[in-house]
Image (cartoon, helix red, strand yellow):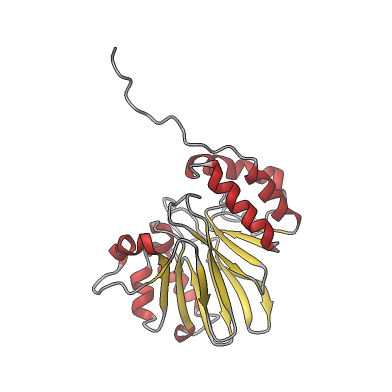
Amino acid sequence: MNTEVIFEDGAHRWLVLGRDRERREDVIDTNQYAILTSDGTLLIDPGGIEIFPRMLSELMRFVPIDDIKVLFGSHQDPDIISSLSMWLDLCPQARFYTSWMWKSFVAHFRIGSVLEAEEIPDEGMSIPIGHDVSVEAIPAHYCHSSGNFSIWDDRAKILFSGDLGAALLPDRNAPLFVDDFDDHIKYMEAFHRRWMPANRPLRSWVRRVRALEPAMICPQHGSIFRGENVSRFLDWLENLDVEVGEGYDVDQQA
Protein backbone atom coordinates (compact mmCIF):
# COMPACT_ATOMS: atom_id res chain seq x y z
CA MET A 1 0.00 0.00 0.00
CA ASN A 2 1.24 3.47 -0.90
CA THR A 3 0.80 6.67 1.09
CA GLU A 4 1.06 10.19 -0.30
CA VAL A 5 0.86 13.52 1.50
CA ILE A 6 -1.49 15.61 -0.67
CA PHE A 7 -1.70 18.67 1.60
CA GLU A 8 0.58 20.05 4.29
CA ASP A 9 0.37 23.26 6.30
CA GLY A 10 2.33 22.85 9.50
CA ALA A 11 0.79 20.02 11.52
CA HIS A 12 -2.32 20.02 9.32
CA ARG A 13 -1.88 17.32 6.68
CA TRP A 14 -3.94 15.13 4.38
CA LEU A 15 -2.77 11.60 3.59
CA VAL A 16 -4.16 9.28 0.94
CA LEU A 17 -3.51 5.56 1.43
CA GLY A 18 -4.18 3.25 -1.50
CA ARG A 19 -2.82 1.79 -4.74
CA ASP A 20 -2.47 -1.44 -2.76
CA ARG A 21 -0.37 -3.85 -4.83
CA GLU A 22 -0.88 -6.61 -2.25
CA ARG A 23 -4.67 -6.65 -2.36
CA ARG A 24 -6.40 -9.71 -3.80
CA GLU A 25 -7.59 -9.50 -7.39
CA ASP A 26 -11.22 -9.95 -6.33
CA VAL A 27 -11.15 -6.94 -3.98
CA ILE A 28 -11.94 -3.48 -5.35
CA ASP A 29 -9.22 -0.90 -4.84
CA THR A 30 -10.09 1.91 -2.43
CA ASN A 31 -8.58 5.21 -1.36
CA GLN A 32 -8.45 5.84 2.37
CA TYR A 33 -7.82 9.36 3.66
CA ALA A 34 -6.48 10.65 6.97
CA ILE A 35 -6.51 14.25 8.19
CA LEU A 36 -3.70 14.90 10.65
CA THR A 37 -3.68 17.84 13.07
CA SER A 38 -1.53 18.86 16.03
CA ASP A 39 -3.79 17.09 18.52
CA GLY A 40 -5.76 14.46 16.64
CA THR A 41 -6.29 12.47 13.45
CA LEU A 42 -9.48 11.77 11.50
CA LEU A 43 -9.59 8.54 9.51
CA ILE A 44 -12.10 8.78 6.65
CA ASP A 45 -13.73 5.53 5.48
CA PRO A 46 -11.01 3.30 6.96
CA GLY A 47 -11.57 0.45 4.53
CA GLY A 48 -12.47 -3.21 4.46
CA ILE A 49 -11.30 -6.11 6.60
CA GLU A 50 -8.99 -7.46 3.90
CA ILE A 51 -6.78 -4.35 3.80
CA PHE A 52 -6.77 -3.65 7.55
CA PRO A 53 -3.27 -5.01 8.39
CA ARG A 54 -1.64 -2.98 5.62
CA MET A 55 -3.69 0.12 6.43
CA LEU A 56 -2.65 -0.04 10.06
CA SER A 57 1.02 -0.62 9.27
CA GLU A 58 1.11 2.22 6.75
CA LEU A 59 -0.75 4.73 8.90
CA MET A 60 1.48 4.04 11.90
CA ARG A 61 4.41 5.37 9.88
CA PHE A 62 2.83 8.81 10.25
CA VAL A 63 0.85 8.86 13.50
CA PRO A 64 0.77 6.84 16.73
CA ILE A 65 -2.40 4.86 17.29
CA ASP A 66 -3.42 7.07 20.23
CA ASP A 67 -3.61 10.09 17.91
CA ILE A 68 -6.59 8.65 16.00
CA LYS A 69 -9.43 10.57 17.64
CA VAL A 70 -12.16 10.37 14.98
CA LEU A 71 -13.42 7.70 12.56
CA PHE A 72 -15.91 8.58 9.83
CA GLY A 73 -18.10 6.33 7.71
CA SER A 74 -19.65 8.10 4.72
CA HIS A 75 -22.18 5.31 4.17
CA GLN A 76 -22.74 1.61 4.82
CA ASP A 77 -20.73 -0.28 2.20
CA PRO A 78 -18.32 -3.01 3.37
CA ASP A 79 -15.42 -1.83 1.21
CA ILE A 80 -15.18 1.34 3.30
CA ILE A 81 -16.21 0.33 6.80
CA SER A 82 -16.10 -3.44 7.44
CA SER A 83 -12.80 -2.99 9.35
CA LEU A 84 -14.59 -0.72 11.85
CA SER A 85 -14.56 -3.15 14.78
CA MET A 86 -10.79 -3.59 14.59
CA TRP A 87 -10.19 0.16 14.50
CA LEU A 88 -12.50 0.75 17.46
CA ASP A 89 -10.79 -1.99 19.47
CA LEU A 90 -7.39 -0.43 18.77
CA CYS A 91 -8.61 3.15 19.24
CA PRO A 92 -11.06 3.13 22.18
CA GLN A 93 -10.52 6.89 22.45
CA ALA A 94 -11.93 7.48 18.95
CA ARG A 95 -15.41 8.82 18.21
CA PHE A 96 -17.19 7.23 15.25
CA TYR A 97 -19.46 9.36 13.05
CA THR A 98 -21.94 8.04 10.50
CA SER A 99 -25.43 8.77 9.18
CA TRP A 100 -28.23 8.22 11.69
CA MET A 101 -29.93 5.87 9.22
CA TRP A 102 -26.97 3.50 8.91
CA LYS A 103 -25.91 3.17 12.55
CA SER A 104 -27.85 -0.05 13.18
CA PHE A 105 -26.70 -1.49 9.83
CA VAL A 106 -23.04 -0.67 10.39
CA ALA A 107 -23.40 -2.20 13.86
CA HIS A 108 -23.26 -5.60 12.12
CA PHE A 109 -19.54 -4.90 11.61
CA ARG A 110 -19.04 -4.34 15.38
CA ILE A 111 -17.84 -7.54 17.00
CA GLY A 112 -18.25 -8.26 20.70
CA SER A 113 -19.81 -5.03 21.96
CA VAL A 114 -22.44 -2.40 21.27
CA LEU A 115 -21.56 0.16 18.59
CA GLU A 116 -21.23 3.64 20.04
CA ALA A 117 -21.67 6.20 17.26
CA GLU A 118 -22.27 9.89 16.79
CA GLU A 119 -25.29 10.01 14.47
CA ILE A 120 -25.01 12.60 11.70
CA PRO A 121 -28.38 14.25 10.92
CA ASP A 122 -29.53 14.57 7.32
CA GLU A 123 -28.47 18.23 7.14
CA GLY A 124 -24.88 17.38 8.11
CA MET A 125 -22.79 18.69 10.97
CA SER A 126 -19.40 19.95 12.06
CA ILE A 127 -16.94 17.28 13.19
CA PRO A 128 -14.08 18.45 15.43
CA ILE A 129 -10.78 16.63 15.01
CA GLY A 130 -8.85 18.50 17.68
CA HIS A 131 -8.99 21.89 19.30
CA ASP A 132 -8.03 23.81 16.17
CA VAL A 133 -9.44 21.91 13.18
CA SER A 134 -12.99 20.88 12.34
CA VAL A 135 -14.45 19.51 9.12
CA GLU A 136 -18.00 19.55 7.78
CA ALA A 137 -20.11 16.53 6.89
CA ILE A 138 -21.81 17.69 3.67
CA PRO A 139 -25.05 15.97 2.57
CA ALA A 140 -24.69 13.78 -0.51
CA HIS A 141 -27.87 11.74 -0.09
CA TYR A 142 -28.99 9.53 -2.98
CA CYS A 143 -25.62 10.03 -4.64
CA HIS A 144 -24.93 6.31 -4.47
CA SER A 145 -26.39 5.84 -0.97
CA SER A 146 -29.62 7.20 0.51
CA GLY A 147 -27.72 8.29 3.61
CA ASN A 148 -24.41 9.64 2.35
CA PHE A 149 -21.97 12.41 3.30
CA SER A 150 -18.93 14.11 1.83
CA ILE A 151 -16.27 15.70 4.06
CA TRP A 152 -15.20 19.32 3.56
CA ASP A 153 -11.99 20.73 5.04
CA ASP A 154 -12.25 24.49 4.62
CA ARG A 155 -8.66 25.18 5.69
CA ALA A 156 -7.20 22.79 3.14
CA LYS A 157 -9.94 23.46 0.55
CA ILE A 158 -10.22 19.70 0.03
CA LEU A 159 -13.44 17.75 -0.43
CA PHE A 160 -13.65 14.02 0.19
CA SER A 161 -16.40 13.01 -2.24
CA GLY A 162 -16.83 9.30 -1.53
CA ASP A 163 -18.20 7.47 -4.57
CA LEU A 164 -18.82 10.71 -6.44
CA GLY A 165 -15.99 10.91 -8.93
CA ALA A 166 -15.10 7.26 -8.45
CA ALA A 167 -13.31 5.53 -11.32
CA LEU A 168 -12.65 1.83 -11.87
CA LEU A 169 -9.06 1.99 -13.06
CA PRO A 170 -7.52 -1.06 -14.74
CA ASP A 171 -3.98 -0.38 -13.57
CA ARG A 172 -2.81 -0.42 -9.95
CA ASN A 173 -0.06 1.96 -11.00
CA ALA A 174 -2.48 4.56 -12.38
CA PRO A 175 -1.54 8.15 -11.49
CA LEU A 176 -2.81 9.47 -8.17
CA PHE A 177 -4.07 12.67 -9.82
CA VAL A 178 -6.16 12.83 -12.99
CA ASP A 179 -3.91 14.14 -15.76
CA ASP A 180 -6.09 13.59 -18.84
CA PHE A 181 -9.71 14.24 -17.93
CA ASP A 182 -11.16 13.29 -21.31
CA ASP A 183 -9.45 9.90 -21.16
CA HIS A 184 -10.47 9.44 -17.51
CA ILE A 185 -14.19 9.68 -18.32
CA LYS A 186 -14.32 6.13 -19.65
CA TYR A 187 -13.35 4.81 -16.20
CA MET A 188 -16.06 6.88 -14.45
CA GLU A 189 -19.09 6.86 -16.71
CA ALA A 190 -20.41 3.32 -16.33
CA PHE A 191 -19.90 3.45 -12.56
CA HIS A 192 -21.89 6.66 -12.21
CA ARG A 193 -24.68 5.60 -14.54
CA ARG A 194 -25.26 2.41 -12.54
CA TRP A 195 -24.50 3.49 -8.96
CA MET A 196 -26.06 6.98 -8.97
CA PRO A 197 -29.85 6.57 -9.07
CA ALA A 198 -31.17 10.05 -9.89
CA ASN A 199 -30.24 13.34 -11.54
CA ARG A 200 -31.73 15.77 -9.03
CA PRO A 201 -29.51 14.79 -6.07
CA LEU A 202 -26.43 14.96 -8.31
CA ARG A 203 -27.30 18.48 -9.48
CA SER A 204 -27.91 19.57 -5.89
CA TRP A 205 -24.54 18.19 -4.75
CA VAL A 206 -22.72 19.87 -7.64
CA ARG A 207 -24.26 23.26 -6.80
CA ARG A 208 -23.25 22.92 -3.16
CA VAL A 209 -19.71 21.88 -4.02
CA ARG A 210 -19.20 24.63 -6.60
CA ALA A 211 -19.96 27.21 -3.92
CA LEU A 212 -17.15 25.79 -1.76
CA GLU A 213 -14.56 26.28 -4.53
CA PRO A 214 -12.47 23.21 -3.64
CA ALA A 215 -8.83 22.95 -4.65
CA MET A 216 -9.11 19.15 -4.73
CA ILE A 217 -11.91 16.59 -4.92
CA CYS A 218 -10.86 13.23 -3.51
CA PRO A 219 -12.97 10.17 -4.42
CA GLN A 220 -13.02 6.79 -2.78
CA HIS A 221 -11.96 4.91 -5.92
CA GLY A 222 -9.68 6.09 -8.70
CA SER A 223 -7.74 9.34 -9.03
CA ILE A 224 -7.95 12.77 -7.40
CA PHE A 225 -9.16 15.89 -9.21
CA ARG A 226 -7.20 19.13 -8.79
CA GLY A 227 -6.70 22.39 -10.66
CA GLU A 228 -8.88 22.79 -13.74
CA ASN A 229 -9.98 19.16 -13.50
CA VAL A 230 -12.09 20.05 -10.45
CA SER A 231 -14.37 22.26 -12.54
CA ARG A 232 -14.22 19.85 -15.48
CA PHE A 233 -15.42 17.03 -13.25
CA LEU A 234 -18.24 19.13 -11.81
CA ASP A 235 -19.32 20.21 -15.31
CA TRP A 236 -19.30 16.60 -16.49
CA LEU A 237 -21.26 15.35 -13.49
CA GLU A 238 -23.82 18.14 -13.73
CA ASN A 239 -24.64 17.16 -17.31
CA LEU A 240 -24.59 13.39 -16.82
CA ASP A 241 -27.98 11.67 -17.17
CA VAL A 242 -28.21 8.90 -14.58
CA GLU A 243 -31.95 8.37 -14.08
CA VAL A 244 -32.94 4.94 -12.76
CA GLY A 245 -32.92 2.21 -15.39
CA GLU A 246 -35.86 0.11 -16.48
CA GLY A 247 -35.05 -2.87 -14.29
CA TYR A 248 -35.37 -6.54 -15.14
CA ASP A 249 -38.98 -7.39 -14.30
CA VAL A 250 -40.49 -10.45 -15.95
CA ASP A 251 -42.88 -9.37 -18.71
CA GLN A 252 -46.53 -9.78 -17.76
CA GLN A 253 -48.50 -12.25 -19.86
CA ALA A 254 -51.53 -10.85 -21.68
Question: In the rendered image, is residue 168 in sight?
Answer: no
Position of 244 relative to 123 (above/below):
above
Residue found at x 46% / y 33%: 245
Quarter-of-image position of residue 158: bottom right
Residue found at x 51% / y 42%: 198
Q: How many numbered markers are drawn?
A: 0
Residue in the foreground of this view, choosing between 27 and 117: 117
Q: In the rendering, at what x and y percent does residue 182 appear?
A: 71, 43
In the rendered structure, the answer to whether residue 204 lies left or right of residue 114 reads: right
Residue found at x 49% / y 80%: 60
Residue positioned most to the right: 228
Quarter-of-image position of residue 101: bottom left
Residue positioned most to the front: 123
Question: In the rendered image, is residue 84 in sight?
Answer: yes
Q: In the rendering, at what x and y percent does residue 140 appear?
A: 52, 56
In the rendered structure, the answer to whether residue 73 lies left or right of residue 200 reads: left
Residue found at x 64% / y 45%: 238
Q: In the rendering, at what x and y percent does residue 227 appear?
A: 75, 59
Position of 54 relative to 147 (above/below):
below
Q: In the rendering, at what x and y percent does residue 155 appear?
A: 66, 74
Give the position of the C terminus as an image quadrant.
Answer: top left
Quarter-of-image position of residue 174: bottom right
Residue positioned most to the left: 112
Residue in the foreground of this view, choosing between 31 and 38: 38
Position of 98 relative to 197 (above/below):
below
